[in-house]
Image (cartoon, helix red, strand yellow):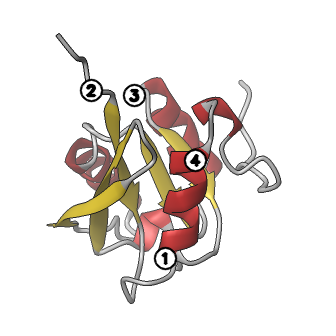
Amino acid sequence: MVIEISFKVAICSKNGKMIDEHFGRATKFLIYKIDEDGSYQYIETRDNSPPSEKLEEHEKMLYNSMKIISDCKYLLASQIGPAANNKLSLQGIRSFGINMPIENALKRLGSSRSKNKFLENIQKPPRVFS
């Protein structure tokens, strides 16, 4: 029996080519699947209602955004706030604030022998410590 290892990646993009959208403003998430051999494929686009500026709605909408991508292992966005980053991390989703072509990011993530070393030269969003 062969066990295939793959994982999903949620990407915040305005134009479908670049990682160019802030997680908190994303109206959609592009979902890709990356297989063990490094190959990747587009799966679907998931619509999202980004949080508004109203504080009472913000937490609810952030929760909904996280629920939409709950089956993904990674989130790639141009920016992500520290609070959202921490909440995603608690859900087992690793998030990266980067700005590059989607194809380049997927190739780097897929070719990384150790997925924990993804985007070694890219700075991860700061963590908030309480």
Q: CA distance from mark 1 to mark 3?
A: 21 Å
Residue drawn where x is 35% and y is 70% of the image: 52
Task: Report the label total.
Answer: 4
Residue pointed to by mark 1: 21
Residue drawn where x is 23% and y is 68% of the image: 49
Q: CA distance from mark 3 to mark 2?
A: 23 Å
Contact between labelled residues 2 and 1, with CB atoms less than 8 Å apart: no
Residue pointed to by mark 4: 111
Q: Is residue 79 in view?
A: yes
Lower position in the chain sequence, tag 1 or tag 3? 1
Q: In the rendered image, which quarter is residue 97 located in? A: bottom right
Q: State the residue lying farthest toward the bottom.
A: 15
Residue pointed to by mark 3: 91
Q: CA distance from mark 3 to mark 4?
A: 24 Å
Local secondary structure at mark 4:
helix
Lower position in the chain sequence, tag 1 or tag 4? 1
Q: Residues within 10 Å of mark 1 (few under 14, many from 20)?
A: many
Local secondary structure at mark 1:
loop
Local secondary structure at mark 3:
loop
